[in-house]
Image: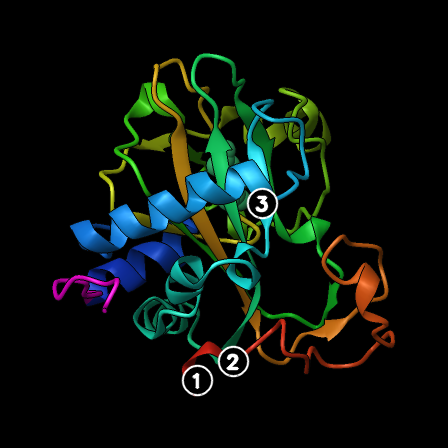
Amino acid sequence: MSTASATATLPAESIAAYRRDGFVHVPDVLDEAGVANARAAAVELSASMESLRYKGEPFTQLVNAWQHDERIRAVTLDPRIAELAEALAGMPLRLWHDQILIKQPQRSTATEFHLDAPYWPHTGARHWLTAWIALVDVPVERGCMTFLPGSHLGDDFVSVDLENATALFDAVPELRWRPRVTVPLRAGDLTFHHGRTAHAATPNLTDQPRVAHAVIYMDAAARYSGAPHVVTDPLGLETGQPFDHELFPRVLEH
Ligand SMILES: O=C(O)CCC(=O)C(=O)O
């Protein structure tokens, strides 16, 4: 069964917007059945998998969920989403990891402004991007993403605590004054954001969990930097080696 609807397309303006702004909204990528399947799997996994973070503050985080459930695997390895990602990045990509991100109802706080790529043990990567897929409707009050357009073009490469509301702005004061774009999503929509784009997510103030699935891609030519990271620590990789490992597939070669 296909998880993607037949309407996912990427007009030239979307590619231009992504390259200019560092993020883009792509509506209607998963159809209703695909969303329902993935959402059921995400909720089931949240009862059985260990979360990297305290449940609900700012989110339940289930890393490499595709290794645990066929329904999530179908989304993470969906070639149509990978095709969109490669069209935006303009280069071959491989999977870095996926993660189910659930903001629990009423209890969760904001995900504060941060960049993603500085957290990752990669060297020589020319691009990273995340497909952040809404598995429920995500209006602003349920924990949707906010981006600082154009921030991916700066030189700043700082790793900050995503639970500290001022950390990124203390490190890069210029970013404090940038306009912010908040992007509510319908279930089945996604946003792509560049690994260097400053972004945050609002708290979930509703009675329903905010369920999202993030699929993160990296330049296929990236190499392992040797820095600690929960995904790579158990793998025994050599510093400087390419990510030639079954956890990091070239999705479009599947
Ligand atoms: O879902 C969230 O609250 C934040 C997600 C995020 O920061 C990301 O996917 O990079």
- Identify the residue shown where x is 61% and y is 47%: 116
Q: Position of residue 197 (x, y in %)?
A: 52, 46
Mark 2 or 1: in front is 1
Asked if the stretch drawn in magenta spans residue 106, the answer is no
Q: Quadrant of the N terminus?
A: bottom left
Considering every residue shown, the one lying at the far left of the view is: 7
Q: Amino acid at mark 2?
A: Arg
| Residue at numbered disc 1 | 254
Q: Secondary structure at mark 1?
A: loop
Q: Quadrant of the C terminus?
A: bottom left
Q: How busy is the neighbourhood of tag 1: few (under 14 within 10 Å), some, or many (20 plus)?
A: few
Q: How busy is the neighbourhood of tag 3: few (under 14 within 10 Å), some, or many (20 plus)?
A: many
Task: Report the number of discs.
Answer: 3
Label 1, label 3: how many angstroms apart (C-alpha)?
23 Å
Tell me: 221 left or right of 236.
left
Q: Secondary structure at mark 3?
A: strand
Indicate which disc, 2 or 3, sits on the residue closer to the N terminus.
3
Considering every residue shown, the one lying at the far bottom of the view is: 253
Q: Amino acid at mark 3?
A: Leu
- Identify the residue shown where x is 35% and y is 15%: 206
Q: Nearer the viewer, residue 228 or 198?
A: 228
Above or below 68: residue 170: above
Q: Amino acid at mark 1?
A: His
Label 2, label 1: how many angstroms apart (C-alpha)?
7 Å
Point out the stretch of residues depicted in magenta. 1-11
| Residue at numbered disc 3 | 62
| Residue at numbered disc 2 | 250
Q: Are marks 2 and 1 in contact (CB under 8 Å)?
A: yes
Tell me: 94 left or right of 188.
right
Q: Position of residue 6 (x, y in %)?
A: 13, 66
- Identify the residue shown where x is 57% and y is 51%: 196
